[in-house]
Every structure is written in structure tokens, then in C-alpha cells.
Image (cartoon, helix red, strand yellow):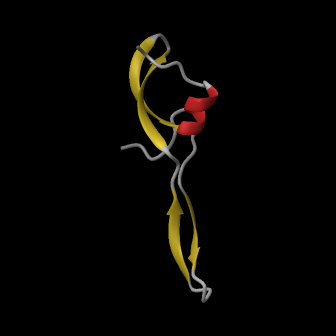
């Protein structure tokens, strides 16, 4: 499964979980990806798109 947005190329970034005692452990911040049917170059395809691209109207959903 794709781990990045097909439109804006948003992907996971790595950071730290920091406890109250300032202990740091690695973690991943993943984008909110949804599988949608969209019109791409005149054809209907199923692509992984982040919710920010869906809300902004960067894709045209297929019916």
C-alpha cells in the first residue's frame, strides 16, 4: 500500500514521543490517507490521497 499522497507527495515524517520525564522514543507521524476513486487523465483510477487534498478540491472524484 502506498504510504504517500498521490497528489501532493505528503509522506510520513519521523520525530520523538516525549514523556513527562523527557524520555524520548522514536515515532512516525503519518498523513491521513484515504483510498478514493478519482478521475486521472480522463480515466477512473483508485489512488491514495490525503484528506487535505480531498478537502481543497485538488482531485475530481469519480461517480
Number of dots carrying numbers = 0
At x 53% / y 18%, what residue is drawn?
Answer: 60
Q: Residue furthest top?
A: 42
Position of the N terminus, as image quadrant, is top left
* Quarter of the image where the C terminus is located: top left
Residue 9 x, y percent position in the rendering = 57, 40
Task: Give x and y (percent) for residue 37.
Answer: 40, 23
| Residue at (52, 39) in percent of width and height | 5
- In the depicted structure, whether residue 18 falls above or below residue 53: below
Is 60 situated above or below 20? above
Q: In the figure, is residue 18 to the left or right of 2?
A: right
Q: Nearer the viewer, residue 27 or 20?
A: 20
The residue located at (58%, 73%) in the rendering is 16
Q: Hey, which quadrant is residue 57 in on the image?
A: top right
Which residue is outermost to the front? 20
Residue 14, image x, y percentages: 56, 64
**Residue placed farthest to the left in the image?**
1
Q: Position of residue 40 (x, y in %)?
A: 48, 18
Q: Is residue 48 above or below residue 40?
A: below
Amino acid at each position: 500500500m502506498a504510504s504517500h499522497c498521490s497528489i501532493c507527495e505528503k509522506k510520513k515524517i519521523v520525530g520523538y514521543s516525549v514523556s513527562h520525564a523527557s524520555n524520548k522514543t522514536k515515532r512516525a507521524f503519518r498523513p491521513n490517507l484515504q483510498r478514493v476513486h478519482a478521475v486521472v487523465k480522463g480515466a477512473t483510477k483508485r489512488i491514495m490521497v490525503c484528506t487535505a487534498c480531498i478537502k481543497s478540491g485538488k482531485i475530481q472524484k469519480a461517480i
